[in-house]
Image (cartoon, rainbow, N blue to C red):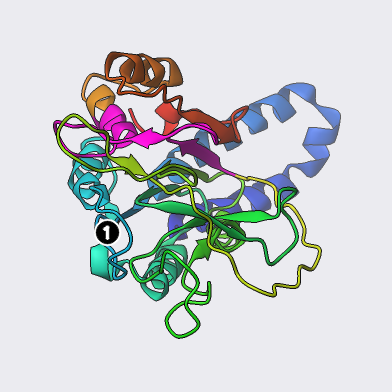
């Protein structure tokens, strides 16, 4: 990073010295621009660090949540990211992934980030809709990641909703990273969860579903009008809003997680290949992963190749 800043200072001096020449001579101006490009490119590339935060939850403090296998996803994501050059990889598994623990881990990776870094965030676990307290959702429901210590239903003693990690809070945490890595940095958020479902789990003939159909209702809530935030990163979600997120049966991991892991073993990851994987490994229900956000400037192969 120091080398990068030194090159910037040098270029500034060169530009001042040759200012008069640049105004009068098109050829010199063109050569100087080429010099800038070739001088800055190696330094910028060498300064980039690939960083990741992986959160995997399979069991909850509240026994009312059905058992899933989000914790099993972590090892697969770690292997995949190591294979493609990520050097700063942090993990939270089960009891480590309380709401406080998740927010703290976001803060740590944010503090570590520099301009130009590439960041990968992965959440495997339950999701749930809950009463919208900011007023930014047209349907009146926020979507939340479920930390280890979040409860399935409102409990005035143990969880009044403050232990859910709602989308507004997630956006705030992600924007902090975006501000650190700047416009030349890149970020991918993978969500192998679901905010609507039935969370069934039975014998080998049944599907293990991430997410539940019942909402977390906060009684007597007063809604104030909020603001919709722009998604300044890529988000890869395991399924469409109305679909169910089904796990693999063998191995017992998230289907989106295993799709990324398997495809990356052979080369770059694309949405076409992910959809083909889902077709080959279809369970009882159709499941269509969705890519949103900065799709015009980045694609999955920028992060996993």
**Residue 216 coordinates in the image, percent (x, y):** 53, 62
Residue placed under numbered mark 1 in the picture: 91
Residue drawn at x 32%, y 69% is: 62
**Residue 224 coordinates in the image, percent (x, y):** 79, 68
Along the viewing direction, whichever of 20 and 213 lies nearer the viewer = 213
Q: In which quarter of the image is residue 245?
A: top left
**Residue 52 coordinates in the image, percent (x, y):** 35, 51
> In the picture shown, does residue 111 fall above or below 54?
below
Q: In this view, does 22 lie to the left or right of 56?
A: right
Q: In which quarter of the image is residue 45?
A: top left
Residue drawn at x 64%, y 54% is: 141
> In the picture shown, does residue 139 fall above or below 175?
above
Along the viewing direction, whichever of 262 and 150 lies nearer the viewer = 150
Residue drawn at x 39%, y 67% is: 102
Examine the structure image and report whether residue 144 is included in the region drawn in magenta: no
**Residue 89 coordinates in the image, percent (x, y):** 28, 54
Q: In this view, does 139 lie to the left or right of 41?
A: right
Q: Is residue 12 left or right of residue 157?
A: right
Residue range of the region highlighted in magenta in the rendering? 233-261
Along the viewing direction, whichever of 250 and 105 lies nearer the viewer = 250
> In the picture shown, does residue 29 fall above or below 174?
above
Dividing the image into 4 quarters, which one contains the C terminus? Answer: top left
Dividing the image into 4 quarters, which one contains the N terminus? Answer: bottom left
Q: What element carries label 1?
A: strand
């Amino acid at each position: 990073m120091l080398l990068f800043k030194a090159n910037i200072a040098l270029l500034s001096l060169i530009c001042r010295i040759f200012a008069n020449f640049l105004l009068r001579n098109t050829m010199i101006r063109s050569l100087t621009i080429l010099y800038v490009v070739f001088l800055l490119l190696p330094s910028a590339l060498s300064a980039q660090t690939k960083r990741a935060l992986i959160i995997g939850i399979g069991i909850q403090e509240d026994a009312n949540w059905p058992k899933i296998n989000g914790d099993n996803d972590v090892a697969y994501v770690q292997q995949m990211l190591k294979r493609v050059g990520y050097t700063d990889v942090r993990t939270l598994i089960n009891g480590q992934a309380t709401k406080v623990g998740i927010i703290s881990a976001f803060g740590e990776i944010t503090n570590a980030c520099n301009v130009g870094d590439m960041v990968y965030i992965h959440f495997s676990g339950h999701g749930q809709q809950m009463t919208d307290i900011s007023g930014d959702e047209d349907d009146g429901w926020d979507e939340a990641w479920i930390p280890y210590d979040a409860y399935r239903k409102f409990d005035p003693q143990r969880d009044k909703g403050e232990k859910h990690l709602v989308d507004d809070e997630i956006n705030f945490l992600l924007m902090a990273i975006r501000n650190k890595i700047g416009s030349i940095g890149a970020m991918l958020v993978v969500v192998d969860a679901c905010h609507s479902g039935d969370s069934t789990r039975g014998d080998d003939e049944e599907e293990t579903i991430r997410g539940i159909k019942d909402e977390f209702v906060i009684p007597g809530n007063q809604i104030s009008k909020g603001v919709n935030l722009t998604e300044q990163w890529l988000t890869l979600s395991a399924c469409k809003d109305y679909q169910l997120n089904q796990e693999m049966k063998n191995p017992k991991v998230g289907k989106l997680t295993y799709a990324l892991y398997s495809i990356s073993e052979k080369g770059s990851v694309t949405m076409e290949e992910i959809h083909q994987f889902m077709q080959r490994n279809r369970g009882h229900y159709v499941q269509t992963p969705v890519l949103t956000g900065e799709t015009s400037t980045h694609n999955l192969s920028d992060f996993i190749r």
